[in-house]
Image: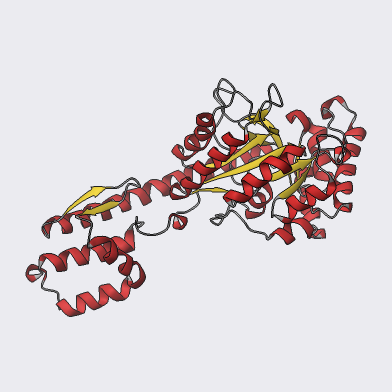
Amino acid sequence: MSVKYRSLTAPALALLAACFLTLTMPLSGLPAAHAATRTVVSLTFDDGRLSHFTEARPILRAHGMRGTFYLISGNLGRPQYMSTSQAKQLAADGNEIGGHTLHHPRLPNLSATEQKREICDDRKALQKMGFSVRSFAYPYGAADAASRRAVADCGYTSARGVGGLVAPGNCNGCPYVDRMPPDNAYQIRTPGSVQTSTSLNNLKGFVTEAEKRGGGWVPLVFHHVCDGCTPTYGIKPKVLSAFLDWLKTRASAGTRVATVGEVMSSNGKSIGQSGSELSGSEMSGTELSGSEQSNAEQRGSEQSSSEQSGTEQSSTEQSNAEQSGSEQSSAEQSNAELASAVLSSAGLSSTSDSTGGLAPSPAPLWDPTLGLLAVWRLPTIRALLSALA
């Protein structure tokens, strides 16, 4: 079949270019949810404070987001802490419940036996309450080799620390994101704890700096959620709400919100738009299988000996990913230039939109056409070529 390109009219050339764009580039007319996940933000809340239920919960629900709540089982029901019933309501919403020890001690100050008791007995207590508990957070972010081994031996699949990522005035020279999965599942890094001095722009910066560097995992640590109830570790409800408002807009950049458990279970694979891999009932009531728990214990016993090897492997994988991404970007640029040339020959111009793709001008008749082309794609191109043969 031969196509007489020289006899093509300007509208036909424009239509052909539009078809080409639908196959090679993201369409601005399509929902942002179609962007591939590159950056994942985990909203984690420590200690099981009452404000997590009264303030954080309605904010999360209003935004359709889920968090990971690390509970001190021995403090449930005490003044200023959630009750067991309130924690169950959080889990029913689809939030993840994690462990945070029985009494919140600084673990490295304890013997290995005492550390294991605080960690294991806490998990058992939460399980008796009906929670499926697979994620842990170190009190004060403090841990040593015995702490990490105990977490794995007790059946957890991950443990989050505090710090290790860049934060304003802290950890200069550190990375901006953790990997998915992390280099060390029992020492997940964060940009420190969110404090009353942490501004909305600071929170946004944690995310945008990750996006600028190609994405990754950004776990954020919250304690009190209230107005003026703590001198240091707290965030105002209106600031948290404003941050989640803004965070929803980042879907177009491939940024998602997911719980710690979802990130770990994804094993580095892409996470869906909502960041949800499990339903609320599955997350709150399903226990880890024997094989999963065995795998967690095996990972913990192998962790210290494989950290160096894993880091080298991750560096190699990152290098390969960057090379692949560079090749893909070159191909996309070539496609964009070709499409732009076709548009130009048809007497139309093209400009870059906010997402970096081609946004043809004028727009009035273009957007509906793109919507139809997004549905038909290949069949449309075949039909067009056949008609012009």
Q: Looking at the rendering, which quadrant does residue 291 occupy?
A: bottom right
Task: Report the side of 305 relative to 9 (left or right).
Answer: right
Q: Residue at x 53, y 29 (%)?
A: 202
Q: Residue at x 68, y 46 (%)?
A: 57
Task: Report the side of 210 relative to 346 (left or right).
Answer: right
Q: Position of residue 29 (x, y in %)?
A: 35, 58
The answer to whether residue 81 is above or below residue 364 is: above
Q: Of 331 and 389, which appears nearest the observer? A: 389
Q: Of 145 and 71, which appears nearest the observer? A: 71
Q: Residue furthest left?
A: 7
Q: Of 9 and 234, which appears nearest the observer? A: 234
Quadrant location of the N terminus?
A: bottom left
The answer to whether residue 190 is above or below residue 273 is: above
Q: Residue at x 51, y 37 (%)?
A: 207
Task: Report the side of 139 relative to 57 (left or right).
Answer: right
Please count the marks in the image: 0
Q: Position of residue 56 (x, y in %)?
A: 67, 42
In the rendered image, is residue 32 in sight?
Answer: yes
Q: Of 87 and 228, which appears nearest the observer? A: 228
Colour scheme in use? secondary structure
Q: Position of residue 166 (x, y in %)?
A: 56, 28
Quadrant location of the C terminus?
A: bottom left
In the rendered image, is residue 143 in sight?
Answer: no
Q: Position of residue 91 (x, y in %)?
A: 74, 53
